[in-house]
Image (spheres, rainbow, N blue to C red):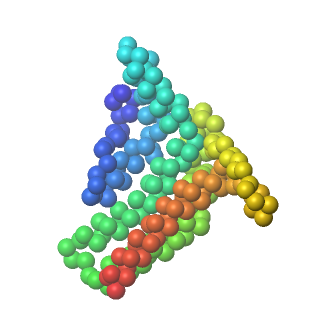
């Protein structure tokens, strides 16, 4: 597997260091195609049926899933900007007014990313998915039907497309949480 993915290796997630989180996501973001090939290689070379099935499953249904391809792109964009400011704030000669400006700039970036980031991440994800020969679709969850108890209850209202559901249920949640967290830190510094 290391021969297939020579440049960046997947690292375990750190609970405390932004740099480690960024590096963990960076491996997926920039070498997803190679990681998928490595999983297929493990499946081909393994004699253990459990290892073979697990590697094929990961390659086909996880790394080979468009939503999975999109997620590390979003996370990398957010973590990269947070890590850049975090490193700057850890400088020994950091001044409080500069720190406030940098956090304010990060909040501005994250707010702008909330509005435009999904579209740009989708473009990148489509390029990667195309190179990996992965279908560029979101999984549509099965529509649940509820029995209406009373006449005044509304019928099932229009559903979001799978892409819109991913955007609202995943992307907007992450970006809103990041903006809220940075606003809290910004208020503490002020």
Q: Is residue 154 visible?
A: no
Q: Which residue is found at the position 35% from the left and 62% from the top?
A: 83
Residue at position x 60%, y 59% in the image: 168
Instruction: Spot the residue most to the front.
Output: 150
From the viewer's perspective, is 31 left or right of 185?
right
Give residue 16's quadrant in the image. Answer: bottom left
Q: Residue 100: image x %, image y %?
A: 35, 81
Q: Nearer the viewer, residue 27 or 178?
A: 178
Residue lying furthest top:
47
Q: Is residue 97 above or below residue 168?
A: below
Asked if 156 appears above or below 32 in the picture, the reply is below
Q: How many marks?
A: 0
Residue 64 horizontal/vertical position (percent): 54, 35
Relative to 179, 166 lies left or right: right
Quadrant into which the C terminus falls: bottom left
Based on the displayed image, in which of its 4 quarters is residue 81 positioned?
Answer: bottom left
Camera-side residue of 154 and 39:
154
Q: Nearer the viewer, residue 181 or 116?
A: 181
Residue at 37 percent across and 82 percent down: it is 187
Residue 123 pos. (x, y %): 61, 51
The percent coordinates of residue 180 (x first, y second) are 45, 72
Seen as rendered, the residue at the extreme right is 151
**Residue shown at the point (56%, 45%) measured from the top left:** 67
Query: On the rendered image, what quadrant is the N terminus found in?
Result: top left
Q: Does residue 148 show up?
A: yes
């Amino acid at each position: 597997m290391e021969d297939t993915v020579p440049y960046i290796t997947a690292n375990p997630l750190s609970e405390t260091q932004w740099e480690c989180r960024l590096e963990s996501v960076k491996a997926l973001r920039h070498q997803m195609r190679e990681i998928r090939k490595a999983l297929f290689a493990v499946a081909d070379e393994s004699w253990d049926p459990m290892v073979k099935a697990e590697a094929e499953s990961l390659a086909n249904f996880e790394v080979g899933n468009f939503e999975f391809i999109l997620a590390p792109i979003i996370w990398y964009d957010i973590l990269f900007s947070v890590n850049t400011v975090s490193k700057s704030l850890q400088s020994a000669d950091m001044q409080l007014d500069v720190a406030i400006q940098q956090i304010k700039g990060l909040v501005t970036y994250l707010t702008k990313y909330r509005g435009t980031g999904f579209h740009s991440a989708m473009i990148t994800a489509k390029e990667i998915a195309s190179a990996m020969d992965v279908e560029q679709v979101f999984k549509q969850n099965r529509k649940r039907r509820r029995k209406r108890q009373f006449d005044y209850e509304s019928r099932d209202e229009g559903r979001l497309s799978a892409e819109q559901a991913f955007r609202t249920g995943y992307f907007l949640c992450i970006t809103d949480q990041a903006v809220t967290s940075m606003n809290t830190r910004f208020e503490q510094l002020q």
